[in-house]
Amino acid sequence: DLRTLRTALAVFGKGCLAASFNCVFLYTGELYPTVIRQTGMGLANTMARLGSIMAPLVKMAGELFPALPFIIYGAAPVVSGLVAAFLPETRNMALPE
């Protein structure tokens, strides 16, 4: 029966999603120096919440122009990558405590 398989795959997918979220959450905390760790985690959490708030609005923008959600979702990572290119290089540098 495909219904059972579909349910099993859905549960497995939700479990993998939860595990990956926890890994990203823990890894993000390790990226920040101790002095600003909570501020960085709070800012990252706020940005994630804003992204989830904006997602339905982007989908509704598709009613105005059908390709607009694809343009927005395609441009967002490109803009993020360009902004990240201006971050200072930290290779082979001592990490602050």
Image (cartoon, helix red, strand yellow):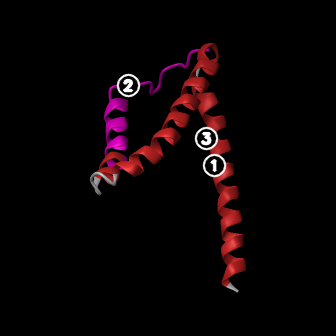
Q: Is residue 77 magenta?
A: yes
**Dot 3 amino acid type:** Val
Marking on residue 86: none
Do tag 1 and tag 2 residues touch (Cβ < 8 Å)? Answer: no
Secondary-structure class at tag 1 = helix
Q: Earlier in the sequence, mark 3 or mark 2?
A: 3
Q: Nearer the viewer, mark 3 or mark 2?
A: 3
The 10 Å Cα crowd at callout 2, few under 14, some 14 to 19, many 20 or more, is few
Please provide the residue range marked out in magenta: 73-97
Among all residues in the image, which is located at the extreme front?
A: 63
Give me the residue at 34% from left, 30% from top: 83
Asked whether 47 or 85 is in front, the reply is 47
Q: Earlier in the sequence, mark 1 or mark 2?
A: 1
CA separation, marks 1 and 2?
A: 26 Å
Q: Image height check: is 18 above or below 51?
A: below
Do tag 3 and tag 1 residues touch (Cβ < 8 Å)? Answer: yes
Residue identifier under label 3: 24
Secondary-structure class at tag 3 = helix
Give me the residue at 50% from left, 34% from top: 50
Asked whether 1 or 81 is in front, the reply is 1
Q: Position of residue 16 (x, y in %)?
A: 66, 56
Q: Position of residue 23 (x, y in %)?
A: 65, 43
Give me the residue at 42% from left, 44% from top: 57
CA separation, marks 3 and 2?
A: 20 Å
**Dot 1 amino acid type:** Ser
Residue identifier under label 2: 87
Q: Position of residue 4 (x, y in %)?
A: 72, 78
Residue identifier under label 1: 20
The 10 Å Cα crowd at callout 3, few under 14, some 14 to 19, many 20 or more, is few
Q: Image height check: is 70 above or below 85?
A: below
Q: Is residue 60 magenta?
A: no
Q: Position of residue 41 (x, y in %)?
A: 60, 26
